[in-house]
Structures are given as C-alpha cells and as structure tokens.
Image: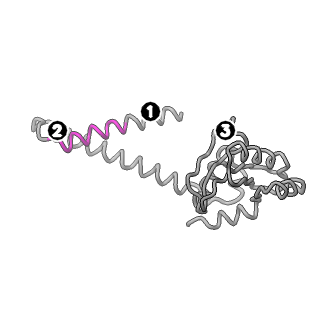
C-alpha cells in the first residue's frame, strides 16, 4: 500500500511538472482549439497537487495534536516511536531521526537539544518497564557515542529499572512526564 501511494504521488508530481511547463512555456505554441482543454487539465493537475500536499502537511503536523493517553496506550510500537518523535520536536528537539525497527542497537530515536545528542528508547507498555529497556538504551548510547540516554514510556518503571538508570545516568520519562510533554503541544 505504501509503495502504491508513493508511486501515485510520483506520477502526480510528474504531471504537475508537465502542467507547469505547459502553463508557463508551451501555452502560446498550442493550437487555439486545444487551449481550453489543456488549460482545464493543467488547472486540475496543479490543484490536485496543491490539495494533496496540503493534506499531507496537515496530517504530518496535526495528527497527534489532540490525542488522549488511552489513544497512546492503544498505539502499535512503531506508531508510538513516531508519536514520541513528534513530541520531541514539539518540545524543542531538533534533527529527529527515528531509527529502523531492527538493528537499532537499542535506540529508537536520535535527536538534538541544547547542543547535546540524545538517544531515546520508546516503550509502549501496559505493565512496568524493567531493566532491559535501560540496558538497551545504555548500549545504544555507547554504540552511537551519544551525550544522553533516555527511556520514554506510556507506563511506569520498576524500582530496579529506576535504580539502574540512576547509576548509569539514564533519564527516565514515565507516564506522568509523558502527559506533561503532551500538554505542551499546540492546540
């Protein structure tokens, strides 16, 4: 489905380019009886391109804006990672990169803030998040040579995970902190 959408968009982009070339350069060379049809086709293609891009921008920038925690709890793991990336962007982080799902070395997102490069492990859980998440983000922190390691979750951390994070210097963002980050989103 994703490839089909990408190919459809590439076709629309190519047709948009043809419509622009016609509108700006070739219109004067066309026979008079073709102009009304070509003008209409160019208008439709340019309008479709503008509408598709406007919808994409709207969806990309506003799809997570009004979410409640129960909707976050229902997300799949990869969607939660993208949601966390959106939250980080809206909370002042820059150069946000969501890593590939497999082989990420324990880091789901890499982002920068205040000159520091941070690695984030995103865990959408229903129970307590344990030591494994802290160990994974610490390993990724060392692998990518990052300044800071953070575990983000929609849940709570176990006592042993909190203790391990404190000893390693890993920052933990639990459910209440995640809610605070969500409140900072523009409405």
Q: Is residue 72 magenta?
A: no
> Which residue does the numbered mark 3 point to in the structure image?
101
Q: Secondary structure at mark 3?
A: loop
For marks 3 and 2, give the one nearer the viewer: 3
Mark 3, Cα crowd under 10 Å, few <14 / some 14-19 / many 20+, is: few
The numbered mark, 3 or 1, whose residue comes first in the sequence reads: 1
Residue 100 screen position, x and y as percent: 63, 38
Residue 173: quarter of image: bottom right
Residue 107 screen position, x and y as percent: 70, 45
Q: Which mark is residue 7?
A: 1
Mark 2, Cα crowd under 10 Å, few <14 / some 14-19 / many 20+, is: few
Residue 86 screen position, x and y as percent: 59, 55
Residue 156 screen position, x and y as percent: 82, 57
Asked if the residue under mark 1 is in contact with the one under mark 3, i.e. CB atoms within 8 Å, the reply is: no
Magenta residues, as a range?
12-27
Nearest to the observer: residue 95 or residue 49? 95
Mark 1, Cα crowd under 10 Å, few <14 / some 14-19 / many 20+, is: few
Which residue shows up at 30% across the image and 45% down it? Answer: 46
Q: Which mark is residue 63?
A: none
Asked if the residue under mark 1 is in contact with the one under mark 2, i.e. CB atoms within 8 Å, the reply is: no
Nearest to the observer: residue 121 or residue 180? 121
Q: Which mark is residue 26?
A: 2
For marks 3 and 1, give the one nearer the viewer: 3
Q: What secondary structure is the stretch in magenta mostly built from? A: helix
Which residue shows up at 38% across the image and 34% down it? Answer: 11
The numbered mark, 3 or 2, whose residue comes first in the sequence reads: 2
């Amino acid at each position: 489905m994703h490839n089909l959408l990408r190919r459809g968009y590439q076709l629309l982009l190519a047709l948009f380019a043809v419509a622009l070339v016609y509108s700006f350069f070739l219109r004067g060379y066309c026979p008079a009886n073709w102009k009304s049809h070509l003008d209409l086709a160019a208008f439709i293609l340019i309008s479709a391109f503008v509408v598709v891009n406007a919808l994409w921008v709207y969806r990309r920038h506003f799809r997570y804006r009004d979410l409640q925690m129960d909707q976050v709890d229902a997300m799949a793991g990869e969607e939660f990672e993208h949601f966390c990336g959106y939250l980080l962007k809206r909370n002042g982080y820059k150069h946000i990169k969501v890593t590939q799902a497999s082989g990420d070395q324990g880091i789901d997102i890499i982002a920068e803030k205040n000159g520091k490069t941070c690695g984030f492990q995103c865990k959408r859980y229903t129970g307590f998040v344990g030591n494994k998440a802290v160990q994974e983000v610490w390993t990724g922190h060392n692998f990518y040579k990052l300044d800071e390691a953070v575990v983000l979750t929609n849940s709570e951390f176990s006592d042993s995970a909190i203790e391990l994070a404190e000893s390693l210097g890993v920052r933990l963002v639990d459910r209440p902190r995640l809610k605070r980050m969500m409140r900072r989103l523009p409405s």
